[in-house]
Image (tube, grey):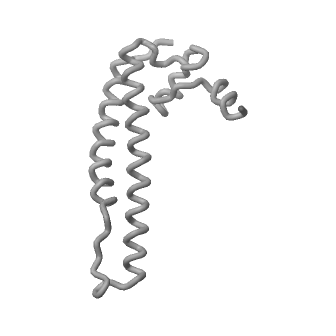
């Protein structure tokens, strides 16, 4: 099967652009919480700290996604996009359509999960 590399390149570039925007938003939400203890109750401070922790976790996941998409672009440039990184089998285009950053075929995924 033939994979339209330019279509995937454009999709990945768009996904990266959206990720960068989400990263900027998550970064501002994850900044240190500065609350005046005299005017804000303890529960409000705890809620603000929880919100900060959730934003920091979101930011970490977005960074991981960005790295995976950048690696997918590098595989397109290297000519290895659409092939399993472990056994070199062709990846199902439906799998790539769902996750263009996929690097393993289902057999290799199962092998890695089972140890």
Q: Residue at x 67, y 24 (%)?
A: 107
- Tell me where residue 15 appears, x and y as whole percent: 34, 36
- Tell me where residue 14 appears, x and y as whole percent: 30, 34
Q: Residue furthest bottom?
A: 38
The quadrant of the picture occupied by the C terminus is top right
Labels in figure, total: 0
- Viewer-nearest residue: 77 or 50: 50
Q: Residue at x 40, y 34 (%)?
A: 67
* Left or right: where 91 falls relative to 80: right
Q: Quadrant of residue 71?
A: top left
Q: Residue at x 72, y 33 (%)?
A: 114
- Viewer-nearest residue: 107 or 54: 54
Q: Residue at x 28, y 72 (%)?
A: 34
* Left or right: where 21 falls relative to 97: left
- The correct choice, above or below, for 25 with respect to 65 in the image is below
- The correct choice, above or below, for 109 with respect to 20 in the image is above
- Tell me where residue 78 appears, x and y as whole percent: 39, 13
- Tell me where residue 29 appears, x and y as whole percent: 31, 60
Q: Quadrant of residue 47?
A: bottom left
- Viewer-nearest residue: 102 or 53: 53
* Left or right: where 11 falls relative to 81: left
- The correct choice, above or below, for 106 with respect to 41 in the image is above
């Amino acid at each position: 099967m033939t994979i339209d590399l330019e279509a995937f390149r454009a999709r990945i570039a768009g996904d990266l652009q959206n990720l960068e925007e989400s990263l900027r938003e998550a970064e501002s939400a994850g900044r240190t919480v500065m609350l005046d203890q005299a005017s804000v109750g303890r529960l409000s401070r705890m809620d603000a700290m929880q919100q900060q922790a959730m934003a920091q976790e979101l930011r970490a996941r977005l960074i991981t996604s960005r790295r995976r998409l950048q690696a997918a672009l590098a595989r397109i440039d290297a000519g290895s996009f659409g092939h399993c990184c472990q056994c070199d089998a062709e990846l199902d285009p439906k799998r790539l359509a769902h996750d263009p950053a996929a690097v393993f075929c289902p057999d290799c995924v199962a092998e890695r999960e089972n140890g």
